[in-house]
Image (tube, rainbow, N blue to C red):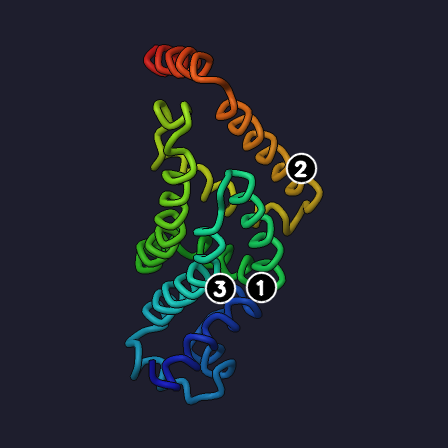
Amino acid sequence: MADTKQRLIDGAMAALREHGIAGVSARTIATAAGVNQALVFYHFGSVDQLLATACQVASKARVDAYRERFAAATSLRDLLDVGRDMFDAERELGNVSVLAQLLAGAQTDQKLAEPVAAALRLWTNEIEGVLRRLLAHSPVAEVADIPGLTDAVAAAFVGLELFGGVDDAAAQRALSALDQLAILVEVVDDLGPVARRALASRLRKRSAE
């Protein structure tokens, strides 16, 4: 990517952190990027398009940064450990505040809604692959809606990241509760074959009710 385009993308992220979605403009982005504001329109056509591109580029970079750790996870607790580290690191980098601003902007601006949703799908696609692998041989997989579970996990972490900004202790308690659920799945997976079949049968019956 051309240096000027990258500077504008970085400037858009910086402007979101400093001014929030309501204060982002070609001027504030150009100031953060250290370029003439006319370059926003020359390279991207509009502020909305620049924000959409910045959202996609930044999300891909963050997903790529965690891909090896996702691939190395061998249990749900490993996955949650990655989530905890993400929780701390993304907040420290200011990415949580950017996400909050983009989500807020997408509520009223359809030009942002699809790019923000697409950026979130980068995360859910990655998480779904991990969940399918981790639950492949678990009785839970027989009744779990993996795409739905993926969306729930992603929504939980987005919510917890935003929640952590106003009540960190509550967010940490919620993460601990998720950890307990992961332990429960491990206990189920450690059952003998007879107990696993019986449990799977019960789960199927209950899910069909």
Q: Which mark is residue 22?
A: 3
Q: CA distance from mark 3 to mark 2?
A: 32 Å
Q: Nearer the viewer, mark 2 or mark 1?
A: 2
Q: 166 and 173: which one is in front?
A: 173
Name the residue tied to disc 1.
Answer: 94
Q: Is residue 191 above or below residue 148?
A: above
Residue at the farthest right position: 169
Residues tagged 3 and 2 counted as in contact (Cβ below 8 A): no
User: Residue flagged by tag 2: what amino acid is it?
Assistant: Arg
Q: Nearer the viewer, mark 3 or mark 2?
A: 2
Q: Position of residue 32 (x, y in %)?
A: 51, 80
Q: Earlier in the sequence, mark 3 or mark 2?
A: 3
**How many circles with numbers are drawn on the protein?**
3
Instruction: Give the image quarter of residue 115.
Output: bottom left
Quarter of the picture holding the N terminus = bottom left
Quarter of the picture holding the C terminus = top left
Residues tagged 1 and 3 counted as in contact (Cβ below 8 A): no
Q: Residue at x 56, y 54 (%)?
A: 86
Q: Residue at x 29, y 84 (%)?
A: 42
Instruction: Give the image quarter of residue 202.
Output: top left
Q: Earlier in the sequence, mark 2 or mark 1?
A: 1
Q: CA distance from mark 1 to mark 3?
A: 17 Å
Q: Residue at x 46, y 13 (%)?
A: 195
Q: 99 and 59: which one is in front?
A: 59
Instruction: Give the image quarter of residue 204.
Output: top left
Q: Position of residue 28 (x, y in %)?
A: 49, 78
Left or right of 79 on screen, residue 109:
left
Q: Is residue 125 above or below residue 138?
A: below
Q: Residue at x 47, y 77 (%)?
A: 11
User: Residue flagged by tag 3: what amino acid is it?
Assistant: Ala
Name the residue tied to disc 2.
Answer: 173
